[in-house]
Image (spheres, coloured by chain):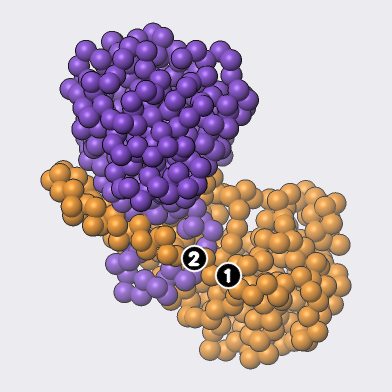
Chain colours: A orange, B purple
C-alpha cells in the first residue's frame, strides 16, 4: 500500500493508472499535475486525482510512488524538474511506448538517483485520448515490459513488478533495445501502416464515396489510425531506426505478394496467404492470471 | 415470401443467408448443396438447410430464389451447371467479393437467361469460415452492393433490393467496375496488407517472442489476416489490376511517411498523422435502419 501517488500527466494512461491503483486499494491519495491546468482540474472533478498540484515538482512532493504519463519527448525535462525531491525510497515509473530514449533521458536527468526509476511500458491503450476516457480496468489483462538499468535498485524493481501484477498485468523484463525492436514490429509498424492506409484512401479522387462502403474489416484494420498524432509522431521519431527497418521489411513482403499477383501465380500466392493466415489464427494475446482488483498486502512502500 | 431457397455453397456466407431468410420468415424451405458432401450434411444437421441436394442443379430445381455462395472462381461453372433450370421468375444472386469477373462469368454462362441474375456483394464476413460459424445476424447492419447488368430484369432487381433490406442491409447499386475499384481500396488492400504484416513478422528471427508481446492494436489490425487463404487468393487475383494499383499507391504513401521520419521532420509528420487520425476518427460505418428480422409482406416471388 502506498501513501501517495504523484501523477504527472493526467491523460488516458495516467488517469487510468490512478483509477486502477485506487480500485485495487493500493494508494491512499493521488496528487496530480498536467501541463494544462484545465486537464488537472477535470481530473479532480472526475475523481481521478484527489488534489491538484500546480507543478510536476509539487505533484511528486511527499509521494512514495510517482508515475510519469507524459509524451516520451517530455521525459527528460519532467524528470529534471522533480530530480531534487527523488529519494531512494521513492518508486518512479513511466508508461512510455519507447524505452531506449526514455532510459537515456533518465540517465541524463536523474544521474545518481536513477536507481529509483523503473522504466515501464504497459502495452495497452485506446484510440481516444484524454482523462475523460480514463478507465480503472484499462490495464487489466495487459502486458507490461520493464526495462531496468544496471543501476535500478532491486527493491524498486520488485515493487514495480508487484504493482503491475496487482493491477492484473503480466510483467516482462528486457533491455530497452530489445523492447524497442519488438514493439517496432508489433505496435509501431501497425500504427504507421494504419496511418498510411488512411492517407492512401484520402488521396483517392472520391474518398468519401469510397469510405462509405468500408465495412468491419476496414473498421478494425484502421482503428489505431485514430490514435493521437502528437504521441505517435514522438513514438515514430523516438524509435525511428527500428521502425524504418520494419517498414522497409514490410514493403518488401508486400512487394513479394504483388509480384505473385502480377505473375498470376495462384499456388505460390495461396501458400503465402496460408502461412500468414495460420499464424494469425493460432496467435492469442497473452492472458495473465486475473489477480487484479483486490488489495495486495505484499506491496511494501 | 419465397417458397424455396436453392443454396449452392453452405459455408459461412451461404449458411448465414439461409438462417437470416428463415429468421425473417421469408422462405419456407431451404435446399442446399456444397461441393463437399460432409459440409452439406453438417448444414442439415445444424438446421441451416432443410434438404440436402446431391448437385447444384438439384439444389436449384424448384427454387424461386437461388443463392450462389461459392468461391468467385467457381461462379461460371456453377451457373453453367444450373443454366437449363433458370426461369425468368427465378431470382439468382451471388455474394462474391469481386463483381467484374462475376458479371463476365454470368454473361458467358447464362447468356439469354442473365436477366434473372442480380450480382450482389454483402460487405460483411468473419475471419472464420465454415457452416459452423453461420449466423442469422451476420448481414444485419451491413451494406450490400448490387451490380446489375443492362439486361437484369427490373422485377428481379427490385426483389433483390427488398430481400437484403428485409435482412437489415443498406443496399447500393453501381457498376461492377466502380464496385471493384472501391472494394480494392477499402477491403482488398487492407487484407493484402494484413497478410503482408503477418509475413513480415514471421520473417523476424524471433517471431514467437515478438508475437508474445503483441497487444490489442496488433490484434485488431491483423484480425483479417486470419481470413480464408483460398478465398483471398481468388479475390486478389480476380481484382488484380485494381488491387495492384492500390497497393502501389499505398507503398508510396508509406514511403512518404518513412521519408519524413528519415528527415526527422516532426512537424510535417505530425501534419500527415493528424489528417489520417482525424479522417479515421470521424469515419463511421454506415448504419442502415434496422428493419430486419420481421417478415416482409412486400416481397413477391
Q: Residue shown at 29%/54% (left/top)?
A: A273
Whether residue A120 is situated above or below residue A40 in the rendered picture: below
Q: Quadrant of residue A271?
A: bottom left
Q: Residue shown at 31%/74% (left/top)?
A: B205
**Residue beneath label 2, please?**
A284
The quadrant of the rendering that contains the C terminus of chain A is bottom right
| Mark-to-mark CA distance, 1 and 2 | 8 Å
Q: Secondary structure at mark 2?
A: loop
Whether residue A53 is situated above or below residue B58 in the rendered picture: below
Badge 1 local density, few (<14 within 10 Å), some, or many (20+)? few
- Which of A231/B250 is in front? B250
In contact (CB < 8 Å): disc 1 and disc 2: yes
Q: Residue shown at 36%/71% (left/top)?
A: B207
Q: Residue furthest left?
A: A263
Q: Residue A262 vs residue B52: left or right?
A: left
- Which of A289/A137 is in front? A289
**Residue beneath label 1, please?**
A287
Q: Quadrant of residue A158?
A: bottom right
Q: Residue A142 vs residue B93: left or right?
A: right
Q: Secondary structure at mark 1?
A: loop
Q: Quadrant of residue A168?
A: bottom right
Badge 2 local density, few (<14 within 10 Å), some, or many (20+)? few
Q: Residue B66: x percent and y percent? A: 37, 26
The quadrant of the rendering that contains the N terminus of chain A is bottom right
- Which of A180/B41 is in front? B41
Q: Chain of mark 2?
A: A
The answer to whether tags 1 and 2 share a subunit is yes
Whether residue A7 is situated above or below residue A113 in the rendered picture: above
Q: Residue A98: x percent and y percent? A: 51, 67
Q: Residue B120: x percent and y percent? A: 38, 26
Q: Residue shown at 38%/29% (left/top)?
A: B6
Q: Chain of mark 1?
A: A
Amino acid at each position: 500500500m502506498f501513501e501517495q501517488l504523484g501523477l504527472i500527466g493526467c491523460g488516458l494512461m495516467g488517469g487510468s493508472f490512478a483509477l486502477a491503483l485506487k480500485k485495487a486499494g493500493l494508494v491512499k491519495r493521488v496528487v496530480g499535475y498536467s501541463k494544462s491546468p484545465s486537464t488537472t482540474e477535470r481530473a479532480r472533478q472526475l475523481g481521478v486525482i484527489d488534489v491538484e498540484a500546480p507543478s510536476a515538482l509539487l505533484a511528486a512532493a511527499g509521494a512514495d510512488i510517482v508515475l510519469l504519463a507524459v509524451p516520451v519527448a517530455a521525459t527528460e525535462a519532467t524528470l529534471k524538474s522533480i530530480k531534487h525531491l527523488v529519494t531512494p525510497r521513492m518508486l518512479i515509473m513511466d508508461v512510455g511506448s519507447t524505452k531506449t530514449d526514455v532510459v537515456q533521458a533518465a540517465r541524463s536527468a536523474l544521474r545518481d538517483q536513477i536507481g529509483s526509476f523503473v522504466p515501464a511500458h504497459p502495452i495497452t491503450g485506446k484510440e481516444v485520448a484524454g482523462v475523460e476516457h480514463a478507465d480503472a480496468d484499462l490495464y487489466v489483462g495487459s502486458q507490461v515490459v520493464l526495462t531496468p538499468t544496471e543501476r535500478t535498485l532491486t527493491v524498486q524493481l520488485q515493487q514495480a513488478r508487484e504493482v503491475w501484477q496487482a493491477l492484473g498485468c503480466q510483467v516482462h523484463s528486457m533491455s530497452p533495445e530489445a523492447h524497442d525492436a519488438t514493439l517496432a514490429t508489433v505496435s509501431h509498424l501497425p500504427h504507421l501502416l494504419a496511418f498510411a492506409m488512411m492517407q492512401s484512401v484520402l488521396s483517392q479522387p472520391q474518398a468519401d464515396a469510397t469510405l462509405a462502403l468500408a465495412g468491419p474489416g476496414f473498421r478494425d484494420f484502421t482503428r489505431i489510425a485514430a490514435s493521437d498524432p502528437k504521441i505517435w509522431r514522438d513514438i515514430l521519431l523516438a524509435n525511428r531506426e527500428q521502425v524504418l527497418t520494419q517498414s522497409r521489411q514490410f514493403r518488401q513482403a508486400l512487394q513479394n505478394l504483388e509480384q505473385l499477383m502480377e505473375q498470376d501465380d495462384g499456388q505460390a500466392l495461396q501458400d503465402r496467404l496460408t502461412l500468414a493466415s495460420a499464424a494469425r489464427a493460432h496467435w492469442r494475446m497473452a492472458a495473465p492470471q486475473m489477480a487484479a482488483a483486490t488489495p495486495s498486502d505484499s506491496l511494501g512502500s
